Every structure is written in structure tokens, then in C-alpha cells.
Image (cartoon, coloured by chain):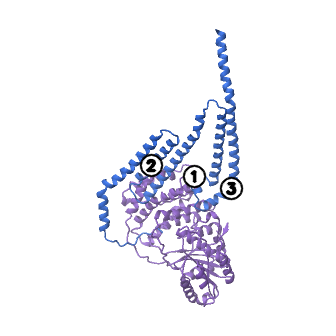
Amino acid sequence: MAAVEITEETKQQAERVGPADVVVGIAGAVSADELRARAQQILSELGSGASSLRFVFAWPGAAPEAAAGAAQPAESPALTLIPFSPPAQGTGEIWADVSASQRAVLALAASLNARACIVLGSDLAALRTHLIQLFTYAVLDRQCGLVMPVYPFAKYDGLINSGILSPLSRALYGKRVHYPLAFDFAASGALCAGLARTSPAAANSLLWPVTVAATQFPQLPVGQVHLDVHHQVAAEGLELSAVLGQLAGSLFQEMDQCASHWQRIRGSQATPAWGNAADGQPEVQPIDPQPMLDSFLLGSKNLEEVWRLLLPPNALLELRRLTKLPSDQFRMPDDLWACIVYDFALAYRLRTINRVHLLGAFTPLYLGWVASYVREVSNLSSAAAEQRLEQFARAWEEKKPYLLSRWRWPDRFNP
Amino acid sequence: MWQQVEQSLHSSMGLVMNKIATLLPGILAFIAAFLFFLLIGWLVALLVRRILTAMHFDERMRGGASAIAEWSPRATPSLLVGRVVFWCFVFAGVVVGVSALGTSEHIVSGWMLGYVPRLVGAAILLLAGNVLARFVARSVLITGVNLNLSYARLLSMGVRWMILVLTGAMVLDHLALGGAIVELGFGILFGGIVFALALAVGLGSRDLVSRSLEREASRPVEVAQPEKIHHF
């Protein structure tokens, strides 16, 4: 295990600043002036409630900008800004770079002996007084180790999260977290150092906050807060298969590394949530799932020889049956989709085929699930769609024994 | 007469025994060299694996986007390196053994010995060509499907056969079989394929291409519609 290193310059500034109660870190490039203005506004709005807490705001600042506005006691005595240098990633993959900055913020918070660290996305959408209050309340007053966000997504938003990341993370680690891949979250002081510390093999992990909290700090409770925030992900130029490959690959790798932990976990625990859930999501127009269905059918026509290497015969039979259904009756059963993802995770671990090929062959299957989901929830309200996703996640938990059995005895035939 | 038959049998038996006796040291040298290198290879591979495990080589390889980790199917990278070291020693043992056999200057002619490296080289070329053809064909197929190309399989098969034909020509050339005919035949075949494709696009699809260009030119500028579905 190695801790994320913060630069000497950042260390010196941290020593100069001294201990802090709450570190609010921005994981991405941001203007120091804008951050200072927003931070001052937050501190003044917090008023007397924050007088007993010392806030430090951190952002990945460049040297000239840092010299202009950093670590200087600002107008308000409670406001302190510290720039830090995130570790050079240069992967060009959006989540990998964000993840590296998040770890650097946590390392800085650990060096400041902070009681709580709030990590926020670089668009500053979540840098608002009531959200800072919510995170602080959950960590300091409710003694949560990790606090994850609940975003007000519509039923057709964040489908990789709804269809793979959230149910798989829940089935594996037993924590019902809505958004394990989050731009904003908070950690207690006890967890900061643990989250910043990571083995070299886990450096590419993207869902590490929940994984580390569930596997290494199971005694610390996990909570959630409702955020009325929509982050803008720069989706232009990103190909679905590349993004899906990155996310699923990271998750499968994490599964391999934490196998000894998640094999012992049964069922899942509800995570308490605070804040007001956005009521009355705007109803969106139904979407035509035919293009996604066509992609699935094209995949099943051409990639069966690849799928045959990765999936057991019964899953292949089910998929073949699905391709023969009329498009208006197309529906992928929850347990089939869960088993497919589990089988791909196993094949990833066993390196049955090249991993890039494996993740590429996963995209048409995912689009098949999306087509099925879109058709199913088209006439449902957002609340009903949320209920449907809860039922969907339970199917993943029920199928966990299948994963355990295949993981332990991969060569045994599974009818 | 019986004495002559007996004498002739004795002399032929003596000749055969003599030949076997002169060949035996070579065969024994081959077996000894092979077994010696096998043992050394096994020991060195074991040592390499132990050292790599102590250095946490597998974890380091998995940590980054390592090429070795990607190219070691069903095995850890340290196992892969151990196997490569082992087979290098086995190969060296075969080469030394064959050389020892060759020095006995019996039965195995110099020509055959000289041809062995070519055979080994050709086998490696054939294997590498097959692996590459399979890998590239699968990559093209998966990428094509993800791009929603209905002719993805056709494209993949075309790429596969192009690589296989190229490999075949290289193998024959390496074995020095066919001489100039292979080069000429391959040149004609490859050139023919390219020429046929050029003709197909230039003549056969002329109308299609012009219609497509006209359609693109006359298409009004579309305002991008916001996507209703978000995967991430």
C-alpha cells in the first residue's frame, strides 16, 4: 500500500495553514477567483454555525495562480485556500484524471488532520452552502465514514450506473449506494488516509471510495445525501464502447482484487439518506429503443463466436431466444442480464480472450439491456422507474450465489 | 557356398553395427544436450518466477495498461516470462543437440541440418501470422459491430485472409520453395485485389458515389438535437 504523494510545496503550505476541521477540495481545474468568491459566500451564509469549524478550500492550482491567491489569510479569518498539484495522469480518460485529483484532495485532508473532507466536481455545481452543510452534518453529526451523493437523475439518465455499476457494487459490497461513481462525496477524517492510500494495482480503480470503505473500513457507516445538482459530463467525442470498456474494465479489475472481501458479504444494507429528494422529476418523452435493439441484433448475428467463449450455453440460448422475439415484445430478464455481467467479470479475470476484445464484445449486450429497460419504463413515472430499478438490483443480489459458484469453480458446468 | 553367405552376413552385420556404433555418440550427445538444457531451463524458469513473484511483478503489470499483462492469456505475466525463458532453453538445447548430431557426419546430411533453422523460422512465421490474423480479424469484427456496420463480418474475413495470404507467401519465401513464382504470384494476387477494388469503386460504384456526394452537398445544415438518453 502506498499513500498518494502530495508535493513538497503543498506539504509546506499545509504545515503553514495548520490543522483544519473541514477540507473542501475541488477535483479539477477551476478559477481561483471564482472559488474564493464562492467560498467566502458560503462561509458568510454558514454564519455562526460555522464559527466553531475551520474550513480549508483546496483546488488543483497552477504555480502563478497559487502565488496570487493561495494560502493567504483572506478577508475572512476562517477562509483559507490551498492549491495542490494532482498526480500527473495524462491518460486522457476523464474519470481516471478526476479520480487522481480526488485522491490528492484526500491526502491533503489527511495531512491537515481534517475531521471531514468534502470532494467536489470541478464545475463547482455542488459548491453551495446547503450542500456543504449536508455533507458536514452527515460526517460530523451522524458519524458517517463515507457520504455519497444521490443525484436527481431522470429515468433515462446515467444508464451505465443504473444498469451495471450501482447494482453490481451493491451486490458485491452490500452497500445500497445509488451512485458509486460520483464527482462529489465526503469522507470522515478516519477514512481520508485510508482512501488516499492505495496499492499500485488499485490505482486504476474508479469506484474506490465505496470499495475501500466497504472492504477496509466496514465498521464505518456509509450514508447518502440528496444533491440537486446536474454535472455536465463532456460527452462529445466519447464513444460508448470506449467509456463502457473503461468503466466495466475498472469494475471487473476491482472485483478480482477484492474477491476475498466480497465473497464473504451476503445481502445488502440500506444506507441512510439526508436532504430533500427532488420531488416531481420532469416527465420525459418516451424514447424509441429500436436503434439500440438493432445494435444488439447486429451483435448477436456477428459476435456469437466471441460470446460463446465467454457465456455458458444457457445464457447463449436465452440470447438466441431474445433475438427471435418481435421488437415490441423484446425484454431482457433481470437475472439474465446480471448473469451476463457476472460471466463477463469471470472471463475478464480468467483472461479467456484478450481483455480489449472482451470489453468490446460487451457493448451490444449492454445496448440490448438498455433497449429492454427503455421499453419497459417508457410508460412509467420517474418514481415507478426508481422502484423498478430497486427490483432490478435485488435480482443481482439473488444471483450472487451464481457468481460465487462460477468464481470458485469456473470450469464447472452451470445449467 | 554357405561359408560365403555366412561371411557376407557377417560383414553386413558388422557394417550395420559399425554404423550404429558411430551414430550412437551423436544421438547420445543430442539426448544429453537436450536433457541438460531442459533441466537448466526448468531451474532458471523457476528462479525467474520466484524473483518476479518477490518483486510483485504481476501486481505491477496489472496496475498499468501493460502489454505483457494483456498478452498473457489465462496466465499471470510472471508465468508467461517463466515459460518464455524455459522454451528459450529448450530451443537452445535442440540447436546444440542437432549440432552435436551433425558433427558425427553420418546419415543426417549437411543440407538437412542447414534446412532446420529455415523450418523453425517458417513455423514461427506461420504461428505468428495465424495469431496476428485472428487477433486483427476479431478486433475489426468487434469494432465494426460497435460502429453498427452491417458488413463487419465481411470486413473481418477480408482482413483475416489478407494477413493469411501474406503469411503464406512469407513462409514459402522463407523456405525457399517456389522461388520467383511465389513472389510473382503473390504480387499478381495482391495487385489484382487492389486493382479490382479500385475498379469496383471507380466504375461500379461511380453512380453511387456521385449520388452520395450530391446528397451530402444539398443536405441542409442540421441542428444537433439534444440526446434524450444518457449512458453516463
Neighbour tally class for label 3: few under 14, some 14-19, many 20 plus, Cα within 10 Å: some
User: Chain coloured blue: which letter?
Assistant: B
Q: Chain of mark 1?
A: B
Q: Earlier in the sequence, mark 2 or mark 3?
A: 3
Could you tell me which secondary element the residue under label 1 belongs to?
loop
Q: Which corner quadrant holds the N terminus of chain A?
A: bottom right
Identity, as a three-letter code, of the amino acid under mark 1 = Pro
Nearer the observer: mark 2 or 3; the answer is 2
Q: Distance of mark 2 from mark 1, alpha carbons?
A: 25 Å
Q: Chain of mark 3?
A: B
* Residue under label 3: B53
* Residue under label 2: B162
Color of chain A here?
A: purple
| Nearer to me, A12 or A244 | A12
* Residue under label 1: B73
| Nearer to me, A118 or B222 | B222
Residue A330 visible in rendering: no
